[in-house]
Every structure is written in structure tokens, then in C-alpha cells.
Amino acid sequence: MERFINFVYVMFIFLSLLFFTPIVNGIGKKCETDADCPNGLCARGLRPKCYISRCICVE
């Protein structure tokens, strides 16, 4: 029973990292133009830019 609970716990952490990190992070979001990248994506002093169909932060 303990091994099963540990397995479920590990799977929950793995799936959380796999699915929720890209959503929260936003970096790597698909885009076609700079306007497709969300404004709140980057830290202060950086701006979002579409580069090779992905949003990145640049100075």
C-alpha cells in the first residue's frame, strides 16, 4: 500500500511539472508575430518577441 501511495505521489509531481510549468511560464508559447506573445511574459526590462514560432524574452 505504501509503494502505491508513493507511486501516485511521484506521478502527481511529474505530471504537475510536465503540464503546468509551460502554462505558467509562458516562454516557448507558439506564435506567428510579436503581438501573439503575452505582455506579462517577461521580467521587467525585457519584452516578448516571436522568434522561430516561439515567444522569447529579449532586451
Image: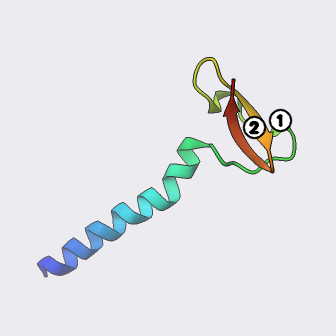
From the top left corner, tell me how far across and down residue 3 is, in percent: 16, 79
Q: Which residue is mark 1?
A: 34
Q: Say which quarter of the image contains residue 44.
A: top right
Q: Whole-Å distance between the Cαs marked 1 and 2? A: 6 Å
Is disc 2 placed on a helix, strand or loop?
loop
Asked if residue 2 is positioned above or below residue 31 in the image, the reply reads below
From the top left corner, tell me how far across and down residue 16 is, in percent: 42, 58
Residue 40 relative to residue 37: left or right = left
**Which mark is on residue 58?**
none
Q: Amino acid at mark 2?
A: Cys
Categorize mark 2 by other alpha carbons within 10 Å: few (<14), some (14-19), many (20+). Answer: many
Q: How many marks?
A: 2
Q: Amino acid at mark 1?
A: Asp
Farthest front residue? Answer: 59
Is disc 1 placed on a helix, strand or loop?
helix
Q: Which of the image's four quarters has the N terminus? A: bottom left
From the top left corner, tell me how far across and down residue 4 is, in percent: 21, 80
Residue 25 relative to residue 28: left or right = left
Asked if residue 49 is positioned above or below residue 24 in the image, the reply reads above
Q: Which of the image's four quarters has the C terminus? A: top right
Asked if residue 46 is positioned above or below residue 18 in the image, the reply reads above
Q: Residue at x 43, y 65 (%)?
A: 15
Q: Are marks 1 and 2 in contact (CB under 8 Å)?
A: yes
Q: Which residue is mark 2?
A: 37
